[in-house]
Amino acid sequence: MTLITWPLATTLAATGGAAAAAALWFQRRRRYSDAASVAAAYDRWTSDQLLERLWGDHIHLGYYRSGQWWKEDFRQAKTAFVHELVHWSGLDQLPAGSKVLDVGCGIGGSARILARDYGFDVLGISISPLQIERARALTPAGLSCRFAVMDAMALELPDASFAGVWSVEACPHMPDKQGYADELLRVLGPGGRLAVADWNRRDPADGAMNRTERWVMRQLLEQWAHPEFASIRSLQGHLQGSRFQEGLAISSDDWSAATLPSWIDSIAEGSRRPGAILGLGPGAVAGALREAPTILLMHWAFATGLMQFGVFRGQKPGTPAVASSEGH
């Protein structure tokens, strides 16, 4: 802990139960080793339903128009994020019935919104079998929304088979950022719209990490099965330089300010819904304590500019195809 500056130490102290949390935290890291390690991490997060009971359908960050977590509803901010990204990316310009792929769909919250509110024919994929099982269980009959276990680095899908590709906070788990970008664009068809959101590190060209930042970055990678973070600039370069780019122009933006309140609000939600944790027993309490330090480190990293929340959009030339009722 000698590498932690006073503001960072103050932030970590706010977790409460510091000794117990620290012991769990250091002993149960989820280091990335391969795709199976990511699947195992998400299977564990899904099996006890702690995150679902606390956060609802979405485990991605929320969009806070006020920039203040105490002024907005936690779950509504997560739903607002989906609509903001749909509108910003132009995905809402696609006609109803368009086939949309959700890469890294979690338990299907965003996919269900895309199908229900925009009329898209959605396929959500995750490398976690338990996430897909839960996504299917939560999806009402009749909604044009299906789910499959699949590796985003090797999509088992034809070229140019989707009018829209959506991927939120999946890139940090990808060992080959160019390969990830290539797969997203390979399956995007003519006239198709791309919508990507990512946790990004500060670009090295904008300043090398100091000693404290290097320590924090190592924790952010090792605690949640991340091989590496791309910067906004580098991921935009991977997308723009893909061999499947086909005339698509990529633009990006930084949504760090609008999403930053999510981290503290994620912890505050536990105090607002104590039954969600206590009702699952002592293991859930230990699990919540175990995640709190990483959440607070994420907040510190995004607040200080070590991390940024990048969003990316683009449209391929041509006219998008509309899916038939036969599905994928």
Image (spheres, rainbow, N blue to C red):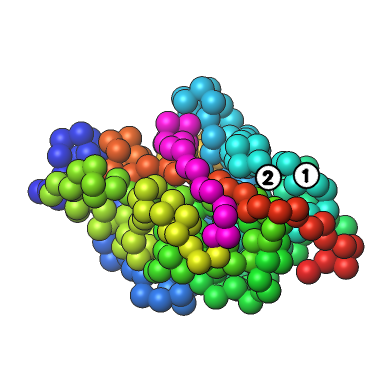
Secondary structure found at label 1: helix
Residue name at image x 69 percent, y 58 percent: 190
Characterize the local packing of mark 1: few (<14), some (14-19) or many (20 or more) Cα atoms within 10 angstroms: some
Which of the two discs, 2 and 1, sits closer to the camera? 2
Residue occupied by mark 1 = 118
Q: Front-most of 267 and 177?
A: 177
* Residue 261 position within the rendered picture, expressed as x and y whole percent measured from the top left: 44, 33
What span is in magenta? 245-260
Instruction: Give the image quarter of residue 223.
Output: bottom left
How far apart marks 2 and 1 lie (CA) works out to 9 Å
Q: Front-most of 44 and 150?
A: 150
The C terminus lies in which quarter of the figure? Answer: bottom right
Residue name at image x 19 percent, y 52 percent: 214
Secondary structure found at label 2: helix
Determine contact: label 2, label 1, CB under 8 Å.
yes
Query: Given the image, on which type of amino acid does mark 1 rest?
Result: Tyr
Characterize the local packing of mark 2: few (<14), some (14-19) or many (20 or more) Cα atoms within 10 angstroms: many
Q: Is residue 275 left or right of residue 12?
A: right
Residue occupied by mark 2 = 91
* Residue 292 position within the rendered picture, expressed as x and y whole percent measured from the top left: 37, 48
Q: Is residue 318 left or right of residue 34?
A: right
Question: Could you tell me if residue 145 is visible in this image?
Answer: yes
